[in-house]
């Protein structure tokens, strides 16, 4: 094993064991670092000791241009790949495997800020009604799922990970397990609570009887936990039935949740807590959405706008 492969293996083990990163995050790091490793090896580099600042800077350019024979990456993906590379170099320096961190001055490529797509309140209502159009337990489940996504702002991974005990229908609250193993309790609206009660009483028992018993809140038609992919399919199918032409995903409901709260006068830091964002700067992108809406209204309604 070359020194390069050895430090890569040690760093990935550090991420998994000491940092405790999620499985999908670990897999993403592995992919990004494998690409970096292949690029270095193609240039005859088999030890991080031989890598300098210009090499890291050149690699960022390669990611954007696709000069290594691979598909060019978008700025956001290149930034994520650089983050993995910088983590590797920091680890190597901290462990004394190299003299210094040569990636410290590397900067991710600038990306154009894209505002999150949202639905208006009427479109959300149409989407939820369409989700509940199916007959029997599946329709009850699908409506409850969309009510939870929009009513709590949950990520799709948080929603499908819910257990029955995470829902408090009497207290109108739900406990979500977010990124970094952080837990937050989010209020549950009466529409969502009503849909969940209908699902738990009239829908879930029928699907649960087809499986071997599960504590998960949302089940598939075999009585097993509903997967993220199946939840995505539920949202897409509901959007098609509702006649929504825009691309609608579970995250669209999360974006709409945040935007509608801010439009209704909610404080951005309260929305931050509800979304489970570690930093308020992540939440502030939604304030730009509401400002754009105000600007459009002003431009069409104010007599001095034109």
Image (tube, rainbow, N blue to C red):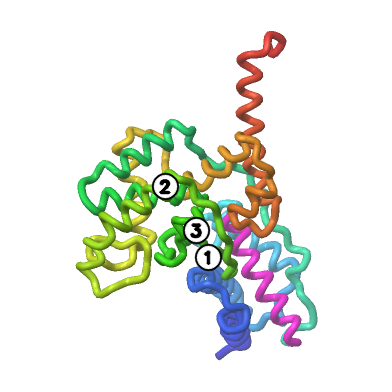
Q: Residues within 10 Å of mark 1 (few under 14, many from 20)?
A: many
Binning the other alpha carbons within 10 Å of mark 3 as few (below 14), some (14 to 19) or many (20 upward) gives many
| Residue at the bottom extreme, as displayed | 1
> Is there any visible trace of residue 142 in the rendered image?
yes
Choose between 44 and 158: the one closer to the eye: 158
Q: Quadrant of residue 7?
A: bottom right
Name which residue lies at 46% across and 56% down. Answer: 170
Residue 113 vs 28, above or below: the answer is above
**Residue to which mark 2 is pinned:** 147
Whole-percent x, y for residue 305 in the image: 69, 13
Q: CA distance from mark 1 to mark 3?
A: 10 Å
Q: Is residue 204 magenta?
A: no
Identify the residue position indicated by label 3 in the image: 174
| Quarter holding residue 94 | bottom right
Could you say whether the residue bearing mark 1 is in a helix, strand or loop? strand
Local secondary structure at mark 3: strand
Q: Residue furthest front?
A: 170
Please report whichever mark, 2 or 1, sits nearer to the chain's N-terminal start.
2
**Residue 212 image label:** none
- Which of 275/252 is in front? 275
Q: Residues within 10 Å of mark 2 (few under 14, many from 20)?
A: many
Q: Which residues are magenta?
A: 76-96
Q: Is residue 214 above or below residue 261?
A: below
The label number, if any, that marks residue 177 in the structure image: 1
Q: Earlier in the sequence, mark 3 or mark 2?
A: 2
Residue 50 sits in quarter: bottom right
The percent position of residue 46, horizontal first and vertical second, equals 62, 82
Q: Residue 42: in sight, yes or no?
A: no
Q: Residue at x 43, y 67 (%)?
A: 165
């Amino acid at each position: 094993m070359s020194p390069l492969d050895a430090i890569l293996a040690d760093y990935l083990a550090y991420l998994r064991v000491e940092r405790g990163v999620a499985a999908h995050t670990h897999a993403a790091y592995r992919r990004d670092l494998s690409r970096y490793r292949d690029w270095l090896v193609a240039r005859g580099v088999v030890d991080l000791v031989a890598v300098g600042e210009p090499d890291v800077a050149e690699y960022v350019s390669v990611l954007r241009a696709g000069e290594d024979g691979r598909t060019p990456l978008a700025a956001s993906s290149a930034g994520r790949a650089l983050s993995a590379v910088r983590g590797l170099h920091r680890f190597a320096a901290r462990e004394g495997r190299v003299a210094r961190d040569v990636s410290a001055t590397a900067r991710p490529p600038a990306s154009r800020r894209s505002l999150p797509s949202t639905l208006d309140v009427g479109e959300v209502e149409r989407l939820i009604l369409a989700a509940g159009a199916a007959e029997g337990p599946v329709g009850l489940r699908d409506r409850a799922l969309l009510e939870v996504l929009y009513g709590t702002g949950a990520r799709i991974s948080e929603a499908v990970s819910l257990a029955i005990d995470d829902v408090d229908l009497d207290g109108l609250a739900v406990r979500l397990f977010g990124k970094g193993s952080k837990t937050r309790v989010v209020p549950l609206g009466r529409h969502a609570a009503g849909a969940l009660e209908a699902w738990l009483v009239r829908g879930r028992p029928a699907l649960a009887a087809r499986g071997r018993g599960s504590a998960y809140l949302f089940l598939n038609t075999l009585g097993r936990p509903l997967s993220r992919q199946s939840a995505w399919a539920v949202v897409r199918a509901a959007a098609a039935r509702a006649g929504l032409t825009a691309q609608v995903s579970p995250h669209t409901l999360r974006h709409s949740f945040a935007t509608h709260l801010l439009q209704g006068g909610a404080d951005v830091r309260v929305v931050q807590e509800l979304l489970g964002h570690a930093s308020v700067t992540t939440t502030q992108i939604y304030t730009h959405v509401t400002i754009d809406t105000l600007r459009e209204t002003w431009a069409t309604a104010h007599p001095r706008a034109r």
